[in-house]
Image (cartoon, helix red, strand yellow):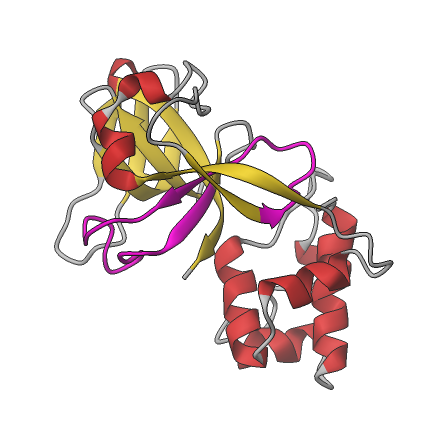
């Protein structure tokens, strides 16, 4: 299972495998050298802080490791579990509100496929396949986003948002209140958005991107 302790231990193990400290691995991946410091792994209030999927993707690219290599470090006993999760294309997801429950989980039916993926433990996840260039340059045609409507979210997380109109956005969460959802954009030349809560069908945190 992807526990907080084991994920951070896997980052340390990946660094050691390549003859680096956690700080050295962060620098090699183009991150701030303090990104993986032990002091950054919990908040001042004692809450767990998780590494972002973006930072993990960067250290995998920097070391040439695959996601499965990393997950084997998370589960060194070889007990890495896999599961089949629902998959739908972005175009289909935007066209059919009945494809999802009120919580933003797959409702099944035509349009849904399945893919094999490592078990995310207690988090409920599904996969979105990016189609076209609506999420470029961050995500491109053919990329697979593993998203969870049940995962906790905080400022700075990357999220997928489906509006009642059918529009689907990939943005950075800036603030979420009972009245509005504030999103920061990744695309140059586009403005940040503040969306009334009643216009939002669901919000899901991006747990992983397979690019």
- The answer, for residue 32, to whether it is visible in the render is no
Q: Nearer the viewer, residue 108 or 24?
A: 108
Percent across and percent down for residue 80 are 75, 52
Magenta residues span 117-146
Percent across and percent down for residue 90 are 28, 40
- Name the residue: 25% across, 49% down: 131
In this rendering, is residue 73 above or below 14? above
Where, quadrant-wise, is the C terminus in this rendering?
Answer: bottom left
- The answer, for residue 183, to whether it is visible in the render is yes
The extreme right residue here reads 77
Percent across and percent down for residue 32 are 53, 70
Q: Main secondary structure of the magenta part?
A: loop
Q: Specify whether 168 is left or right of 9.
A: left
Query: Is residue 143 in the magenta section?
Result: yes
- On the image, which quarter does residue 191 sit in? top left
Q: Specify whether 205 is left or right of 23.
A: left
Q: Specify whether 25 is left or right of 154.
A: right
- Name the residue: 19% across, 54% down: 133
The extreme left residue here reads 189
In this rendering, is residue 42 above or below 194? below
- On the image, which quarter does residue 14 sit in? bottom right
In this rendering, is residue 107 above or below 92? above
Query: Is residue 161 in the magenta section?
Result: no
């Amino acid at each position: 299972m992807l526990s907080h302790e084991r994920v951070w231990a896997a980052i340390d193990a990946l660094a050691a495998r390549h003859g680096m400290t956690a700080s050295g691995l962060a620098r090699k991946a183009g991150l701030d050298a303090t990104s993986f410091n032990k002091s950054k792994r919990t908040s001042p209030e004692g809450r767990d802080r998780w590494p972002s999927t973006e930072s993990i993707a960067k250290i995998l690219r920097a070391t040439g490791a695959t996601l499965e290599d990393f997950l084997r470090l998370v589960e060194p006993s070889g007990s890495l579990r896999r599961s089949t999760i629902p998959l739908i294309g972005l175009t289909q997801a935007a066209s059919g509100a009945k494809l999802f429950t009120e919580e933003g989980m797959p409702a099944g039916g035509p349009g849904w496929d399945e893919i094999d993926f490592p078990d995310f433990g207690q988090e409920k996840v599904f996969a979105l396949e990016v189609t076209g260039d609506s999420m470029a340059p961050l995500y491109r045609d053919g990329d697979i986003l593993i998203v969870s409507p049940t995962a906790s979210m905080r400022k700075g997380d990357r999220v997928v948002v489906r509006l009642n109109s059918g529009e689907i956005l990939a943005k950075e969460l800036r603030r979420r209140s009972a009245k509005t959802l504030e999103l920061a954009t990744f695309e140059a030349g586009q403005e940040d958005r503040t969306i009334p809560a009643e216009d939002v069908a669901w919000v899901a945190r991006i747990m992983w991107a397979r690019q």
